[in-house]
Image: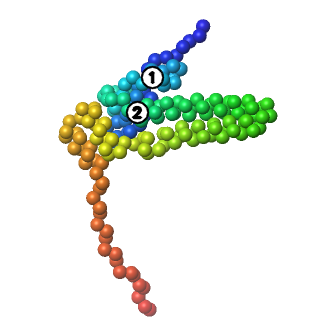
Amino acid sequence: MHMVIFGSRLYGKVDEVPGLGFVATKFGHLYYVPLIPTEGWLVVAEEGDGWRGQAIPVSGKSVLVAWARAAFLIGGIISLLTGLISLSNIENGAATVLGVVAVLCIAGLITSYRWTWVTQASPERALEIARQAGLSEESLADLRQGHEAPAPVPAAVPARPWTPPES
C-alpha cells in the first residue's frame, strides 16, 4: 500500500513585523513540497501545528522564498546523495561538482532564513502589511512610530584629561 501525503500548510515565512507577526503563504503541497500558492496570511501566532492570523493578498516574495527553500533543500539532498554514490564509484570529478552544488544549496537555504531583506519587513512594507490586514489608523500610527529612527542622544561634554598631581 502506497501512501500519498498531500494537503495545505504555510510556507515562505518572510517580512516579520515586530509586535505584529509575519507574512506566509498557504500552499497546496505534495509530500510537503510547496506547489500551488492559495492564500497569503499575516500570521500573528503559532500554536502547536496551527496558527492564527489574517488573510492578506498573496506575497510574491513569500511564494518565491518558499519555492527557493524547497529547491535548495531538495537540490542539496539529491546532490549530496548522488555525490556520495559517485565517490563510492571512484568518480571524483563528478563527486566534487555535486559536493559543491550540495554546499551551495545548504548555504542558500541557511541564508534564506538569515538574510534580513527576506526575514524582516522594511518600515514601508510593515505599514503595507498592516493596511492589508485591516489594522485601525491608531494601530498604523503606533506601528509608524515604532519604526521611526530614535532621536539622537546628545553627547556628553568630554571631560578635561586628568593629569596626576606632581609630587
Q: Identify the image quadrant of the N terminus.
A: top right
Residue 9: x, y in percent?
43, 23
The quarter holding residue 139 reads top left
Q: Residues within 10 Å of mark 1 (few under 14, many from 20)?
A: some
Question: Which callout, 1 or 2, points at the residue further toward the start of the chain?
Answer: 1
Nearest the camera: 112 or 167? 112
Q: Residue at x 75, y 38 (%)?
A: 93
* Residue where numbered disc 2 is placed: 60
| Residue 50 visible in rendering | no
Residue 26: x, y in percent?
40, 25
Q: Residue at x 47, y 31 (%)?
A: 66
Q: Residue at x 32, y 45 (%)?
A: 123
Residue 110: x, y in percent?
53, 40
Mark identifier at residue 152? none
- Farthest residue toward the top? 1
In the rendered structure, the answer to whether residue 82 lies left or right of residue 162 reads right
Residue 96: x, y in percent?
71, 39
The quarter holding residue 50 reads top left
Question: How far apart in space, not on screen, are marks 1 and 2 (Cα)?
Answer: 12 Å
Query: Which residue type carries mark 1?
Result: Ile
Q: Residues within 10 Å of mark 2 (few under 14, many from 20)?
A: few
Q: Identify the image quadrant of the C terminus.
A: bottom left
Query: Which residue type carries mark 2?
Result: Gly
Q: Residue at x 32, y 29 (%)?
A: 56
Q: Secondary structure at mark 2?
A: helix
* CB under 8 Å between discs 1 and 2: no
Mark identifier at residue 36? 1
Nearest the camera: 140 or 75? 75
- Farthest residue toward the bottom? 167
| Residue 128 visible in rendering | yes
Give above or below for 61 relative to 167. Answer: above
